[in-house]
Amino acid sequence: MIKKLVVAFSIANLCFFRAWREILSPQTLSRLYFWKEYPIHAAGEALAINLLLVTSILLVGFTVLWPRGRLARNFVRVVFLVVLLRALNAVRAQFEPLSTGQLRAFLGSAGYFIAGLIIFGLLIFLIIRFGLTRVARAGVVVALILSPLGLIGLIQLSWLTVKYRDFWHDQPAAPLLKSTNDQPRVVWLIFDEMSEYQAFANRPPGFSMPNFDRLRAEAVSATNAFPPAGHTTQSMPALLTGKLIASVKPSAPDELMLQFPDRPGPVKWSAEPDIFTEAHNAGFNSALVGWFHPYCRIEGSRLSACVWQPANLFGDPDRFSFSKNLWKQQADLLMLVPGTKLLRTWLSPRSFDDYRAPHLAAYETLLAAAKRAVVDEKVGLTFIHLPVPHPPYIYDREHAVSDIKGERQYLDNLALTDRALGELRNAMEAAGVWERTTLVVSSDHWWRADFWRPVKNFWTTGDAAIQSNRVDHRVPLIIRLAGQRTRATYTPAINTVLTRDLILEFLGRRISRPDEITDWLDRHRTIGESPYQAYDDPE
Ligand SMILES: [Zn+2]
């Protein structure tokens, strides 16, 4: 009985080889940084249950059929051999050098077909020469030899679960420092992927951003500001540390390695002082509401309050659902049966190229948290990083409602950005803190129209019309000092990596007039465009 159980388990395990590979693959693990939850729980639990289920079905099928005479036994042997060979073939296809595409390229279509015929012929020859019983016995030996694979997988899965268990918690908040109402207050607002060109420099006719225009009438606007990098992973830590970063690499769910250009090796973000460390040293509480980076896992203990939401752009959001994993793994079993591709697609449709629903959910969660954060009297520095106007597009600007079904465009998300600014300002006005708050608004990078063009829901026909000939790399930098009433424009090229130092000047009460901002920028500006403009992290 134990031998039958081991053989059934081994066959079931081989059938789920693809699911195993997805769970344990290094690619899955390298993306843990970007995820809010631990994906291995849902997929691993589903796999364990599926393994149990298929093992039981095989065992019950055998127990019922085996005593029913010679014909039934031969039927069991044939089914056993077919399932074993299909499963082994599926295992073969998971290895790149042996994948069907590679073999076809190597042998040619005819060669591949002939190789298949030879293997099939060999099997028939073996059955004729040695009899079905002996061939099936040889199959049992193969299954027994491969049976430890499942145990190894389960051990590896348990080890990963234990290893990464502690990385998934947000750090405990910093104890509150004593604060007074006459302390400076700064709100630093980053709208992801907001372009100076489309919003202000070359705004399309008929498009309006009333809240931004109202803000700019009482603020200093830098019209040639460039971000520290071309993508969020690199730009945000550069803004917060106030230093250009040459490259970044996630190393754990709660760690990003930063390579500064002037240092020999990468350093941990969690160990690198940034604006929150400085603010704390100067006696200020800081709060953060942010998208994309797991801020609260990395530096939650520098903040008196922290909320974050993941980007959901790194793979199937369904991977966190136990039931969807269970179903998908079962549907994938159909791969073992030739000619079932359509049925499989119908049973388990791949819907994960549409990120609009999770994007809207992240936006709404973060905006609600931001509205609470910006009115907190105990906090001196509030940092907000919102996921708009970054695509996918989630807003209908004509009807001023969210929309995750229609074909929207960058301008819709830009209108939503304007609305978010208005809502945050209203919240501060209603709480009576607006006039004593210094507001800094910028972005982490420009609108990467050249990058999104091939991506569904990230680029629509309306976008082509408002794009500049060359992708414009400028981002807004708008600073309204507490109580400011006058408009000022700063035109020399600057890099927003200096924002951190400028904000520390505000907190230190060393700058309180618009002309002091422009003087400070004149004295501290170095480069305009950053040398780091890649859109992806180096692997
Ligand atoms: Zn970004």
Image: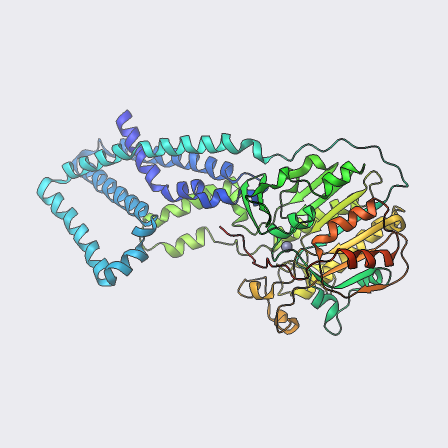
| Foreground of the two, 185 or 264 | 264
Residue farthest to the top, as pictured: 2
In the image, residue 362 sits, relative to residue 196, either above or below, namely above
Q: Look at 43% across and 40% down and name the residue there.
A: 24
Percent across and percent down for residue 386 are: 70, 52
Asked whether residue 4 appears in the rendered view, the answer is yes
Residue at image position (40%, 47%) is: 332
Residue 410 picture location, percent across and down = 66, 64
Residue 293 at x, y = what percent? 62, 46
Q: Nearer the viewer, residue 362 or 510?
A: 510
Image quadrant of ligand 1 equals: bottom right
For the point 53% across and 56% down, the residue is: 353
Residue 60 visible here: no
Question: Image quadrant of residue 400?
Answer: bottom right
With respect to residue 433, does 444 lie above or below? below
Residue in view at x 57 percent, y 31 percent: 166
